[in-house]
Amino acid sequence: MIKNSLISGISQQENKGSVEFQIVNFTNKIRRLTSHLELHKKDYLSQRGLRKILGKRQRLLSYLANKKKVRYKELITELGIRESKIR
């Protein structure tokens, strides 16, 4: 499973409170909630929770992009979140 391999790779290097670990955790929650919302389109509380998690992940990603640009690019490509826009 993707989650176990990414978490094991990060947890060996970092602690569970690190920014990278939290981003991986939020990404897994987002993927789970997205698949749930495909079945249950009118689950508005889950939609709200998804938006909150997306906002938290966005803030962590912007923090990581400002502090460690190389690690940010690596994490983006590992997770397949978006295309890197940083030069």
Image (spheres, rainbow, N blue to C red):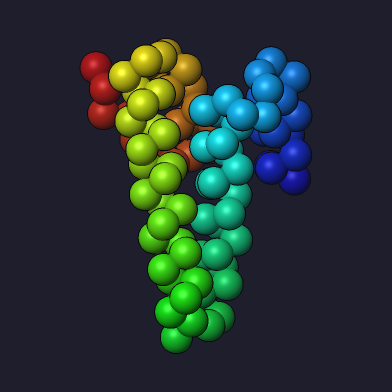
User: Residue 76 appears in which quarter of the rendering?
Assistant: top left
Residue farthest toward the bottom in the current orientation of the protein: 42
Numbered circles on residues, count = 0
Taking the image as drawn, is residue 9 in sight? no
Left or right placement of residue 53 versus residue 7 in this view: left
Nearest the eye: 11 or 18: 18
Figure quadrant of the C terminus: top left
> Would you place residue 58 above or below residue 42 in this image?
above
Residue 23 in picture, x, y percent from top left: 52, 37
What's the residue at 47%, 76% (across, down)? 45
Could you tell me if residue 70 is visible in this image? Answer: yes
Q: Residue 76 or 7: which is nearer the viewer?
A: 7
Where 28 sits versus 23, above or below?
below
The residue depicted at 61 percent of the width and 29 percent of the height is 17
- Residue found at the very far front of the displayed protein: 17
Residue 25 % position (x, y): 60, 43
Taking the spot 52% from the left edge, 55% from the top edge, the residue there is 30
Q: Position of residue 54 (x, y in %)?
A: 41, 52
